[in-house]
Amino acid sequence: MSNPLQQTIEALAKEKGIEPDVVISAIEEAVATASRKYYKTGENLKTRFNMETGQVDLFALKTVVQEVANAATEIGLDEARDIYRSLYGDDVANSIELGDEMEFPKPTEVLGRIAAQTAKQVIFQKVREAERENVYAEFSQRVGEVVNATVKRFENGDIVVEVGRNEAVVPRKEQSRAESYNPNDRVRAVIKGVNRGAKGPQIMLSRTDPALLIKLFEQEVPEIYDGTVMIRGAVREAGDRAKVAVFSRERDVDPVGACVGMKGTRVQSIIRELRGEKIDIVEWSEDAVAFVTNALSPAKVQRVSIVDDHERVMEVIVEDKQLSLAIGKKGQNVRLAAKLTGWRIDIKSEEEKRREVEAQFEGLEAAAADSLAEESPAKTRRQTRRPTPNTDSPRQNRRMCRRLIRSLASARRRSAGSSTRASPRRTQWRAPR
């Protein structure tokens, strides 16, 4: 580009971060709008930017017809051929047919100051719209990316920051309770979304989203960046505690140790960035029981049982001393573990579980006693109908009395024989008959 207008277009496009063609189309539309306000003839006006001269040419478009009904937009075939014959020769004139659109130049030097102001406003509007669309297209593709921003001002609890040449907002609900900022402070946040608004695209940043934690681990841990260690899930309660589930693709690489680093250097840098937020790094497992056991760290779990696989409910038994640690402050530890694993976790101590089992046994015994009590009247009725040998009758009572008397008599005889010598028993022999 050699002429001053083209150089100005290049400089404006570079400053606004848009393509020069966008500026040129804005200029063309601005001149067309100003020309319509000036001429007011109802003609179909068209503009074209001349790259050689750097000027904007104005044309009136008319359709070639057999009979003219509207002179502002239509022209007869013979008239069109006569005009083009005098300008371009017989060959061009004879090639004109019905339905063709003819361009008739119109002067732009007559446009006054008001038309120029109108063109200026249109150019600014079009350039601003193109700039906003460019910002929206750029940041909508960067959702989930961590950016560095500078605190600019505060509006109704929201923090307005500057990301490059654009402004972004950190809403109050996306701010951590443990953090406070002053103007010109530098902050790292994750792009959560881009919204279209009347004043242009609004870039939403977040300091509480788990994506920020994941991106910080990717930047600090090389094994996560190259894919050796994978983050399978992350949950946060910003400012208090977070849990991250990691998994190693290689058997020789410890995923938890890789994230912690030598003497905790890697995880400590992330904790400093999050203003002292505690981070629990647990190992992910395909086994749901093992995963829940790891997720409840630092508490030690005695046993885990699946209560309902369809509803994803688990019962976890811990020692009495570990119960408060497993539940956490205001239920924070078990709440984060449930979010991380996707299971509903019911934590009980051993004493509580023992009382529950005893109560269940007592209930079963009571139910068994009730069932026996219900069955005994029916048995009595059956026994009265068909007496069994065990039924107490007068005959059996007499037999039992006789047996008792015989046993008593034999007992007396044994006692008498022990005090006096028994006389020898004589054996009588009888001759056979």
Image: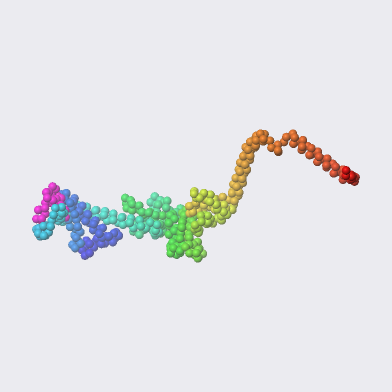
Total labels drawn: 0
The residue sitting at 21% across, 56% down in the picture is 28
Name which quarter of the figure residue 189 lies in: bottom left
- Relative to the observer, which residue lies in front, 261 or 344? 344
- Relative to the observer, which residue lies in front, 69 or 1? 69
The reply, left or right, for residue 110 in relation to residue 22 is left
Magenta range: 59-83
The reply, left or right, for residue 124 in relation to residue 79 is right
The residue sitting at 53% across, 49% down in the picture is 307
Is residue 280 one of those drawn in magenta?
Answer: no
Which corner quadrant holds the N terminus? bottom left
- Relative to the observer, which residue lies in front, 234 or 2? 234
The residue sitting at 24% across, 60% down in the picture is 9
Is residue 77 one of those drawn in magenta?
Answer: yes
Name which quarter of the figure residue 227 lies in: bottom left
Colour style of the rendered protein structure? rainbow
Identify whether 336 is placed above or below 266.
above
Q: Position of residue 265 (x, y in %)?
A: 49, 64
Query: Can residue 62 be seen?
Result: no
Q: Where is residue 417 in the image (x, y as percent from the top left)?
A: 87, 44
Name which quarter of the figure residue 17 lies in: bottom left
- Relative to the observer, which residue lies in front, 310 or 173? 310
Query: Can residue 210 be seen?
Result: yes
Which corner quadrant holds the C terminus? top right
Residue at the extreme front: 433
The reply, left or right, for residue 151 in relation to residue 259 is left
The residue sitting at 41% across, 58% down in the picture is 188
Q: Where is residue 250 in the image (x, y as percent from the top left)?
A: 48, 64
Q: Position of residue 223 (x, y in %)?
A: 45, 64
